[in-house]
């Protein structure tokens, strides 16, 4: 994978993550929001696999919201 | 009873600190779901309230696609449908599905598996899980599956009954080859709850873990939920005083049977939920209505169900018969028009809970393959168990013994434990009462033996209720 390919993949994954987050935050349907959250999380893990982003941002963006975690 | 409604089901999870409140759930921060979703009584309102005509149109589309896929990709279906002279394009309506398509049975799938003929579509790489049936009916069936097949079996029920992501689940389950609670575990993760796995430890350790982790939802078979409570009391722990507010069960008849509901709810001071599914169908599940304890809704998101008579004819709305299910979830090993051998009474009218999905009144009424004929009367062991639960003073711990042979008439006899605290002097009166009820309701004499409390065997997963002592037929 060259730098251009990596950049393209990263852009796609960022777009997927962004769309998933939008669905998670706005759909109002639990069955959709739960899957969207997993989509968002896996897109984040894939981005991490490509060396992009700080993985721990995920904890903020998905907002697990519990000090126990 | 402790509140069965999660704190965030009411508040939308807007950061109310409930840690330490124990029975209500974990602390809330920014919620996992939007406020609209959090406050929805439905996991998926679109499908759960879809008008029957639209539901049936969706089913027809899905069935046609699945039948076509199975015929062209699964040798077992090609074989069965060719023998029946049916092609996928012959199934144009739901009526065609009922009248033209052959049903398949567990024994068919088992036979093809044993002969090494493929029952599976696609390549081995698609098989990400391999489970087995628990062997309730004798044959153990392999259940190959693909990861997404496992989700959304329990979520509909849990959401409808107020479980939310701030709940903590305790899985009192050994995580073995039996699939049911694996899917519950995956669904808890999907929904966003915290999961505590109680696999690989003994019952006493599980009680200690429940005290330590303070789960709000206990996941177990009904038999084991009662066993846990019994052991807790032996340890000096009051299960009613624990953090558990919901006991969610599957694997055998649970809360849909009034006596079992009372036993579980009394033991735990918690709401008991029941889920009915056939594991090889990958959890095409039915679960109890949030408004009516006497009925279950069949999840029409996960499959298509019909009720038929002994000849395969469709039963009218409100009729009783065998439940045949096509699973949309069993994608690797499709099961189409699959005989469950479960006797149900179906109703198609919309429920006042808002759902349009099929209602099964009383859940599974009996196993059709366990029916015995006594003096010309059909007797279902499950019905015997349900009726005994109506006798005040008797517990849900029952053994039903079937005897007879080629030249000996079939008889049914029952052993049942009384509730704890019932004095032995009352046993004869209970026996008379139980025998009269069975005779009045079923029409034959079934002897009842009231045995001392704690004398029947205890089980760690499912209880063995029916003991058939008749000689096995040889083919």
Image (cartoon, rainbow, N blue to C red):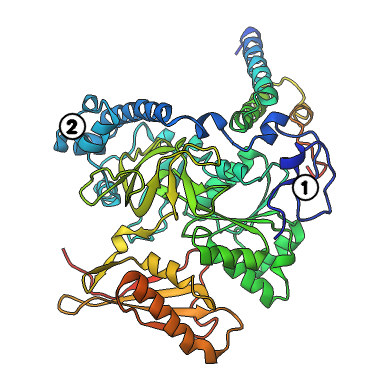
Mark with earlier residue (2, 1): 1
Is residue B131 at all visible to an observer of this figure? no
Tell me the crowding category of disc 2: few under 14, some 14 to 19, or many 20 or more residues within 10 angstroms, Cα based.
Answer: some
* Direction from residue B48 to residue A59 in the image, left or right: right
Q: Quadrant of residue B232?
A: bottom right
Q: Nearer the viewer, residue B13 or B436?
A: B436
- List the residue tagged with mark 1: B26
Above or below residue B169? Residue B262 is: below
Tell me the crowding category of disc 1: few under 14, some 14 to 19, or many 20 or more residues within 10 angstroms, Cα based.
Answer: many
Question: The residue marked by circle 2 belongs to what chain?
Answer: B
Q: Which mark is residue B228?
A: none
Residue ID at (36%, 47%): B318
Q: Secondary structure at mark 2?
A: loop
What is the tally of numbered marks visible in this picture?
2
Q: Which mark is residue B86?
A: 2
Above or below residue A3? Residue B227 is: below
Q: Quadrant of residue B409?
A: bottom left
Q: Which quadrant would the C terminus of chain B be assigned to in this image?
A: bottom left
Q: Position of residue B162 (x, y in %)?
A: 66, 45
Q: Position of residue B82 (x, y in %)?
A: 16, 34
Mark 2 to mark 1: distance in Å?
55 Å
Residue ID at (66%, 29%): A37
Q: Nearer the viewer, residue A62 or B97?
A: B97
Question: The residue marked by circle 1 belongs to what chain?
Answer: B
Is there one chain holding both mark 2 and mark 1?
Answer: yes
Q: Position of residue B468 (x, y in %)?
A: 31, 72
Q: Nearer the viewer, residue A16 or A52?
A: A16
Q: Secondary structure at mark 1?
A: loop
Q: Position of residue B225 (x, y in %)?
A: 59, 64
């Amino acid at each position: 994978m060259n730098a251009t390919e990596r950049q393209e993949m990263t852009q796609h994954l960022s777009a997927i993550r962004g769309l998933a987050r939008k669905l998670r935050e706005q759909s109002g349907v639990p069955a959709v929001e739960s899957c969207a959250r997993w989509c968002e999380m896996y897109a984040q893990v894939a981005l991490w696999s490509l060396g992009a982003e700080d993985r721990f941002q995920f904890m903020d963006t998905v907002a697990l919201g519990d000090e126990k975690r | 009873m402790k509140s069965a409604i999660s704190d965030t089901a009411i508040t939308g999870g807007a950061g109310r600190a409930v840690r330490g409140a124990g029975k209500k759930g974990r602390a809330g921060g920014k919620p996992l779901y939007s406020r609209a979703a959090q406050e929805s009584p439905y996991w998926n309102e679109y499908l759960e309230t879809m008008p029957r005509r639209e539901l049936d149109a969706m089913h027809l589309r899905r069935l046609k696609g699945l039948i076509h896929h199975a015929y062209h990709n699964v040798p077992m279906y090609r074989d069965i449908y060719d023998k029946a002279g049916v092609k996928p394009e012959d199934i144009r309506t739901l009526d065609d599905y009922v009248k033209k398509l052959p049903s398949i049975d567990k024994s068919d799938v088992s036979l093809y598996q044993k002969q090494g003929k493929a029952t599976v579509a696609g390549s081995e790489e698609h098989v990400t899980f391999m489970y087995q049936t628990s062997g309730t009916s004798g044959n153990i069936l392999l259940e190959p599956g693909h990861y997404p097949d496992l989700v959304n079996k329990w979520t509909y029920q849990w959401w409808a009954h107020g479980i939310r992501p701030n709940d903590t689940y305790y899985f009192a389950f050994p995580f073995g080859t039996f699939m049911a609670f694996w899917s519950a575990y995956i669904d808890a993760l999907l929904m966003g709850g915290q999961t505590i796995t109680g696999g690989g430890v003994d019952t006493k350790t599980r009680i200690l873990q429940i005290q330590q982790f303070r789960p709000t939802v206990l996941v177990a078979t009904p038999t084991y939920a009662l066993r846990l409570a019994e052991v807790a009391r032996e340890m000096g722990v009051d299960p009613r005083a624990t953090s558990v507010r919901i006991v969610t069960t599957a694997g055998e008849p649970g809360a849909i049977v009034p006596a079992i509901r009372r036993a579980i709810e009394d033991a735990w001071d918690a709401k008991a939920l029941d889920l009915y599914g056939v594991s090889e169908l990958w959890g095409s599940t039915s679960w109890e209505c949030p408004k009516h304890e006497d009925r279950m809704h069949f999840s029409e998101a996960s499959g298509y169900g019909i009720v038929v008579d002994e000849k395969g004819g469709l039963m009218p709305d409100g009729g009783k018969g065998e439940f045949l299910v096509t699973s949309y979830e069993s994608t690797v090993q499709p099961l189409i028009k699959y005989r469950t051998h479960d006797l149900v009474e179906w109703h198609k009218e919309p429920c006042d809970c808002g759902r349009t999905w099929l209602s099964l009144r009383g859940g599974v009424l009996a196993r059709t393959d366990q029916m015995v004929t006594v003096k010309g009367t059909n007797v279902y062991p499950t019905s015997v168990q349900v009726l005994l639960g109506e006798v005040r003073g008797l517990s849900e711990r029952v053994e039903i013994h079937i005897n007879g042979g080629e030249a000996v008439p079939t008889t049914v006899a029952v052993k049942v434990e009384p509730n704890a605290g019932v004095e032995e002097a009352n046993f004869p009166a209970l026996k008379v009462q139980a025998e009269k009820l069975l005779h009045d309701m079923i029409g034959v004499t079934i002897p009842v033996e009231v045995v001392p409390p704690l004398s029947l065997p205890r089980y760690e997963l499912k209880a063995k209720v029916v003991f058939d002592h008749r000689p096995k037929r040889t083919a």
